[in-house]
Amino acid sequence: MAKIVIKEDNYYHNLELLCQKAGGKDKLMAVIKDNAYGHGLEIMAKLASRFGIKKAAVKNLEEALHVEDLFDEVLILADHPSQNKLKDNISYAVHSLEFLKRFPKNSNIHLNIDTGMHRSGVLMSEIRESLGLIKENSLNLKGVFTHFRSADDFNAELFWQQENWKDAKKEAIKCIKELRLDMPNFHSCNSSALLRSQKTIEDDFARCGIATYGYTHIDKNIATYDLKPVLSLYANRLSTRVLKKGQKVGYGGVHVADSDKIISTYDIGYGDGFFRYDGLGDLSIANGQKILGRVSMDSLCVEGEKDEICLFDDVSEISKYFNTITYEILTKLMPWIKREVA
Ligand SMILES: *Cc1c(COP(=O)(O)O)cnc(C)c1O
């Protein structure tokens, strides 16, 4: 059976590095949304908690309910309240004035402010109105945050947005004091913004996903970082045969044998979330061997007859091959693939 292996040591290595940057374990929120970027929600939540991480961010309520016992705070990033009786440590991100008005009384919320990404968040000009509504509607303001659009890029955009965030924070603090609300936590950095910060962050914590799993897309002209990939994908042999010179393998017969060779099929395909390689380029598994022909829904083909092969222990090359980002290759891995910690 195919499996995913989680390297605990690598995860802790990455967390250590990020916590040092942030200024302590209390200043790092582990982003474990989307099944912990495909790594397995409960496994990664337990590891993070064992390491001493106290805060986590998830996609929706369903994910929050799976990990609520492990953290002091669980922030739901992309969902709306659908039930009233929630544990006190669960809170929701609020992304607009429109939806802020609809939040049920006493909800725990983190207010998202749009400081330049223009994807979500209340406008900077709506900060006062938003906080007024929070007071009026008896919402429990736990956090105020923003998200950076260009933290990976080799230009000055991050600094521009960080200036906006400083202004937003100042305005929010002023209004919060006037309204006599409790002072919430402020947070802005994702992995890249935290990695790039030259000194301990001024915010209360950073929200890190991809770097905890061992990757960054920060332009190499800015810096490189000592991160270690956490996830490896293994597949097991389903069958073996001799492919004679001139014979073709798989859909469309895209791969033609240039000599007699032993080939085997393995139990991972695009239905498992492995990207569908069309057999035309030059895509290799971890040991450098080529994938032969097209990837099928539940299988792919490689020369040899090993019982188990490692498809990847680092998705950087595969993500470049498919012109995408490591995030996408990882999050696509289906939840039914067995996960184990090593
Ligand atoms: C996904 C997400 C993060 C984590 O981003 P990384 O680049 O993976 O560190 C942080 N904040 C918000 C709001 C997110 O949606």
Image (cartoon, rainbow, N blue to C red):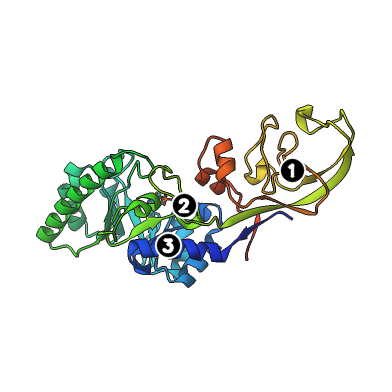
Q: At 83% from the left edge and 49% from the top edge, which residue is drawn? A: 305
Q: Quadrant of residue 164?
A: top left
66 left or right of 22 in image: right
N-terminal of the pair, mark 2 or mark 3, is 3
Q: Which mark is residue 210?
A: 2
Q: Is mark 3 within 8 Å of ligand 1?
A: no
Q: Is residue 336 visible?
A: no
Task: Name the residue that disc number 1 marks.
Answer: 299
Task: Name the residue that disc number 3 marks.
Answer: 17
Mark 2 or mark 3: which is in front? 3
Q: How many marks?
A: 3
Q: Amino acid at mark 2?
A: Ile
* Mark 3 to mark 1 CA distance (whole Å): 37 Å
Residue 89 x/y as whole percent: 36, 67
> Do residues under tags 2 and 3 come within 8 Å of each other at their CB atoms?
no
- Taking depth in this image into account, of 220 and 260 the one nearest to the observer is 220
